[in-house]
Amino acid sequence: MRAEKLLCSHRATIREVMVCIEKNGKGTAFIVDDEGRLSGIVTDGDIRRLLLEGYGLNEPIQDYMKKDFVYASTREKAEEIQKKFNYAVRIVPIVDENGKPVDYGEYNENIHISLAQPQLSGNEYKYLMDAFLSTWISSTGKYLSRFEEGFSAWCGTGYGVATSNGTTALHLALAALGIGTGDEVIVPDLTFAATINAVLYTGAKPVIVDLEEESWCMDPEAAERAVTERTKAVIPVHIYGQPCDMGRLCEMAKRHGLYLIEDCAEAHGAEWNGKKTGTYGIISCFSFFGNKVVTTGEGGMCVTNDKGLYERMRILRDHGMSKERKYYHEVVGFNYRMTNLQAAIGTAQVERIDEILKWRTEVEKMYRQAFQGIKGVILQRDDLKGRKKIAWLVSILVAEDRRDAVLKHLKETGVDARAFFIPLSEMELYSGYAEVCRVSRKISHMGINLPTTWEMDREKIQRIAELVTEAL
Ligand SMILES: Cc1ncc(COP(=O)(O)O)c(C=O)c1O
């Protein structure tokens, strides 16, 4: 009986309960009556308070123990018991049908590790309140230009057009390039659906291609094989923080006269050949969703060095309205504007982006150490020539037939991990646009993304590595 070492008779003195707590190492004693039924709980904090108040060690505990305590019954499920914990209740006695304590539930530090809680402790609140109090809460206000200029400069590009989210950024880029019905656009099989959906919004036909085995990014050879006379653009996606082979993709795009649009949603600050991703595309698109490296809650941005495209995107973002003549529309545009409130958060995030990335790199390093020597776990490569990946989530591969068991084990323990994206080619909605993508399917079925939430530390990471290993 696991509860045994926590039991003390209600006839015990404060001193005897202290000894029990000292020995059991759980910081708690369960006080039982002569029939062995639970009648009270005492924690080491309770004892400390009694002594500070001047009570003697030989006083009887039953006069001072907690009688209105939290407990559970053996009939309750683990999830129900978990709900009973709070900042003060760390141990919950579990009693049988006679009220006798037989076990206890213990608060597990590793429960509730979210996937990617953002870090908002810089000037985010201050700027957000400033924007709020200014009453410029829609899509006009000083933070919009500050954010656009700050983020695009950090990327190393001349112009930024902030959008309502990363999906609208992709659509805006395609629309500004005049891509539409009759055109083809090449996309990778392993990506979030936004990449292909944005192509479909334009009326163009997406053409899905397979990945490189090592980088999990779009395979430049597969992309080249997919080029036809109708191909207008290619959208490499820097998946899970890993930059694509921009050397070969840019060269291929140039040779065939294609527009190259980078999908940088998951790779803020990743580099190819010492230059940031986002600087290679004619337009590059970012997402600032809550789980991204830089976040504005929802949000996105197109960055470019092309002034004409910049101006065109600004018009299309705002219903296609002329900048010279209010309410005069020359093209069918969209409302893809970002609000000043989002931009206020983004402005503060940009101030600390290098610090955020540095910290994420540390988290990834701790994961690499924790998984060192563990057979059956393959970490995303960080040593590919010419590529400097960033730590967005921490991505691993395990055997395909154990992947779901690992995810289940993590979920049951409260760790918010995610399976890789389902390959586009495996979904009925998109499969008509793809050949069989062997590499993408293999990687997708083995892949797990682990948390990089702001609260990560070595202990939590070690625990996650243990949990993964237990389920392999
Ligand atoms: C690769 C990729 N592209 C595009 C997007 C779309 O961004 P958003 O969610 O901001 O619309 C995401 C978002 O999660 C993404 O992961």
Image (spheres, rainbow, N blue to C red):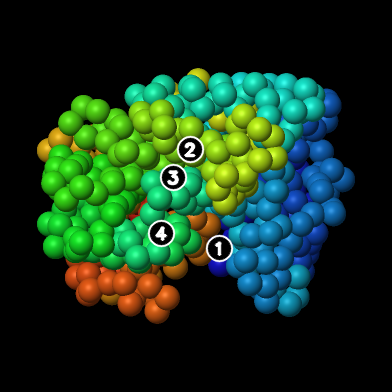
**Badge 3 density bin: few <14, some 14–19, many ≥20, Cα 10 Å:** many
Amino acid tagged 3? Ala
Sequence order check, earlier mark of 2 and 4: 4
Q: Which mark is residue 2?
A: 1
> Residues at badges 3 and 2 in contact (C-beta under 8 Å)?
yes
How far apart are labels 4 and 1 at the CA level?
67 Å
Query: Between 452 and 51, which is closer to the camera in this rendering?
Result: 452
Amino acid tagged 2? Arg
Sequence order check, earlier mark of 3 and 2: 3
In front: label 3 or label 1: 3
Q: Which mark is residue 281?
A: none
Label 1 SS: loop
In front: label 4 or label 1: 4
Name which residue lies at 42% across and 36% down: 309
Q: Which quarter of the figure is the N terminus placed in?
A: bottom right
In the image, residue 52 sits, relative to residue 63, either above or below, namely: above
Name which residue lies at 55% across and 48% down: 331
Query: Between 369 and 174, which is closer to the camera in this rendering?
Result: 174
Name which residue lies at 28% across and 54% down: 232
